[in-house]
Image (spheres, grey):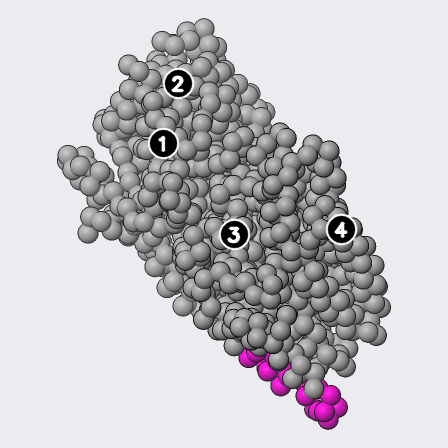
Amino acid sequence: MDFETLLSYEWGVMMPEFIILGVAIALSLIDLFMPENRSRRLLGLFAFVGVAVSFVSLLGLWTSDVTSILGDTFRLDSFAKSFKALLLIGSALVLLLALHYEPKERIAYRGEFYYLFLTALLGAMMMTSSGDLITLFVGLELLSISSYILVAIRKKHTLANEAALKYVITGSIATAITLFGMSYIFGFTGSTNIKEITGQLASTYDENHQYILSLAFLLTFVGLSFKLAAAPFHMWAPDVYQGATTPVVSFLSVVSKTAGFVIVLRVIVSVFAQTPSGSSASMLMTLAPYIAFLAGATMIIGNTIALRQRNVKRMLAYSSVAHAGYVLVAFASLSMFMFEAIWFYLLAYLFMTIGAFAILQVVSQHQDDEDVSIFAGLYRRSPLMAVAMTIFLLSLAGIPGTAGFIGKMNIFLGAFVVEPAHYVLATIMVITTVVSYVYYFGIFVQMFFRPVEHTHRLEWPSGVIAVVVICVIGTVLLGVFPNIAYDFLAPFEHFSDFLQ
Amino acid sequence: MQPYFLSLLIFSPLLGILVLSLLSKEQEKAIKWLGVLATLPSLCLSLFAFWQYQNGYDISKLTEKRSWIRFGEFPFLKETDFTVAYELHVDGFALVMIVLTTILATLAAIASTSIQKEWKGYFQLFLLLEIGMLGVFAASNLVLFFIFFELTLIPMFFLIGKWGYFEKEKAAYSYLIYNGLGSAVLLIVIAVLFARTGTSNIAELRYILTNPAVQTISPISDDLRYGLLVALLVAFGVKLPIVPLHRWMLRVHVQAPPSVVMLHAGVLLKIGAFGLVRFAFGLFPGQFQQFSTWLIVFGIVNLLYGAFLALRQTDFKMVLAYSSVSHMGIVLIGLGSLNEAGIQGAIFQAVSHGFIAAFLFFFVGVMYERTRTTTLARLGGLAKTMPYVSGFVLAGAMASLGLPGTSGFISEFMAFVGAFQAEPWLAAIGTLGIIMTAVYLLRAVLGMTFGQTTVSNVYDLRGIEWVPAISLLLLIVIIGVYPNVLAMPIQTTIETMMNGLGG
């Protein structure tokens, strides 16, 4: 590759990534030279502005054609654009929360928090655009390693240390499994470029290869389920959620999970959707029952174990496991609604989850534990926030009028429109949703029916209020007028360029 | 005003919710007055529409339709596929149910004056509940129906759990889980129909499902139809309730505040009947016919089970709760008869029981406020201490057991006429239930009115309490004496249903 070709690339399509990268580097330098006793909040604001500018530059690219640079390793297609938007919106909201996070024990490494946060985001964004297994993997590791440190940032906190260690160990195992799966794919095709892999696999069909390819599929998928917090790699979620700080938890449960779905779709759909199979149209369709099985298991595990949690963060951890299961239903159905359903659900999930964590952050700030009773009498202490929390929980429970309902409806449509329809899977989803009412409504009981337990005044910093307001608007508006979001996807024509 | 009339009717309580949120928590009087006032606009609008309809106005002109949600635009599909419109529509049956709802909402709001705490939140939820109930009857597509259907779930959970009696939270949870499962099953049916046909409009679905020639996006096999019908029967069977699914409803009847039970027994249970008529019967008439005998059997089980258990209750609220179970059996018997008289009886029973149950529960509230008990043994001698109250309760019981001249008589009579035509033997067993009804109601009411005086220093009916008492009694008698007031509006609905059966 000479200098000429390097210059001929349309570097503009990487603008959002460059901005994040630049801000992350700048932040690390500023943090280095800043006097130690100065507040790091300014860095946080800078990071927030960086994310916002990056989002604007993404919108500038919104209607551009599919572009592929750097030898097909980086591609900007409609899939990349729409999911990058989710990552950036989620990160901006989480940064607003982090600005006002004041836990009991001070956090010494605030500067580090902000630039590690941005590198994690950068990793996630690279994954959305990767056209090559190597860049995909680098993005994944960038995200993972940054988030391991983010979890451990309260380094004097016992639970945080436990959480970080568990996260690193399970994470590494999962990565190893993924890599092992990918190595089969590489071994078969001799290439790491997704386009080439797809072409190679599509043109050759050998019955003996099917088993090994299936093995590759399962290993890759199971390994990636770690990022989704889906079965079988969901066990880290409750411990890590409990140990990590609230902004980090909301990052893990929204941005990192979205990134997990991004890589699953990128690898699994592009590699296996066009690979011929003996019994049905493609290998992906033959193997979809395995995804369906994992989706069902994830929903059941998440929702039933959440019933027994008293700690709110652990409860929300299992709830996030369950939501990963719902999204996997959309994936397992492989219907024409798949991409839209997943995107919309993740958008709805973003608003309702970050909103709930924002309120949890303030309510739990001066408490020793996060027992569900910290919500006792919230309606009397801050009625508006109790109502906002109600909206988020109703949306998480999928009650009509909220974004969560439309998201679930879209997933159902996908599950039922295909032939044969996924009746069992959809039934599991519906029943476990009703099970989830029990624990979500348990918080209502605390907020509205129980007398006040902790009388100290709750302080609502401006950033948290902003997050709550944005999330309430997002949750309700998408629930009542979902086409606002769907219209954003209109120029993409159902992600038809995904496999081009 | 025509294009907005129904929206205005449904959402007018919203105004009350907004104004209430501006008031301070402490202004008890103002809040209570406002709560009642806020139910009046929809009451007036619905009565106006009903009156116009009686005078020959074509209510299909009130139909509203605006485009709303669109799931995916695919070049290979029609423009309208996978869209959900915001569309409202009423026919005679729906209008009757709406009038029932608005009347009971206003009267229950008046009865809510006995609520002791946090009036503001109470009335806001109460009005939200009213919006949900009105929307259910006016929605003309399944998705919209479901949204309103679930909208009733949330306020009810809070109304029971916060303002109820001793075991209120348990009752609220049991309400939530049973009804949540019921709605879950309903949601599956709705999603399947929507996904496979691309539309959720009820009229279009009826056309598609009853014309085998129509091509759907995905095939709908006969087995699937049976499955969907059974699912619908379960979903609305929870709401109605049909016997093995009834336990939640007993708890709610006993634990919820009486004013809420007025709406619950009066309207919410009727959504079950409405759903059975509209969707189970309306969408799958052919399959429904196969199930008709089973429906009658279930109806008789409901009728007898409710009646026998009502006989041995010691609490007046429990007597009424089982009586509701028993009376809903008559709705099932009527529907299962599959003839004009039977269906008419079922709809009559739904409306009539709505008024009677609300009437009796209103007096449960009145009595509890004064005596702090609803145990039969401790309510003796009411005829001496509260002569008017005990008189009204006796009248309510008479209507409930089907005394000629009251609405209860007409509906039971019609339902059984239908049943005798369809399944004479089963109907004969069913009549046992009617005798039982007389026995348990008279036992309970006579025990309270006469018998040993146990309470003293209580005042009789007073002030605004006369309004619900008199108006409900009048309605019960009017329907009993002049049933055409109800029979005429529902006539077209019944004819459409009979056409669906093919003759």
Task: Identify which amino acid the numbered label 4 is placed on.
Answer: Ser
Q: Could you classify mark 3 by the number of other residues whose Cα lies within 10 Å: few (under 14), some (14-19), or many (20 or more)?
A: few
Q: What type is the residue that disc 1 sits on?
A: Leu
Q: CA distance from mark 1 to mark 2?
A: 14 Å
- Mark 2, secondary structure of its residue: helix
Asked if the residue under mark 3 is in contact with the one under mark 1, i.e. CB atoms within 8 Å, the reply is no
User: Residue B1: horizontal and vertical position, in percent?
Assistant: 19, 52
Residue B399 in the image: x percent, y percent?
Answer: 37, 27
Q: Chain of mark 1?
A: B
Determine if the magenta segment contains residue A45.
yes
Q: Which mark is residue A500?
A: 3
**What is the C-alpha distance between the residues marked 4 and 1?**
51 Å
Dot label at residue A183: 4
Magenta part of the protein: which range? Answer: A30-50
What's the CA distance linking mark 1 and mark 3?
38 Å
Mark 1 vs mark 3: give the one in front.
3
- In the displayed structure image, the side of residue B352 where residue A420 appears, left or right: right
What secondary structure do most residues of the magenta stretch adopt? helix
Residues at marks 1 and 2, common chain?
Answer: yes
Q: Which mark is residue B205?
A: 1
Other-residue count near label 4 (Cα within 10 Å), few / some / many at <14 / 14–19 / ≥20: some
> SS at mark 1?
helix
Q: Nearer the viewer, residue A225 or A385?
A: A225
Marks 4 and 3: same chain? yes
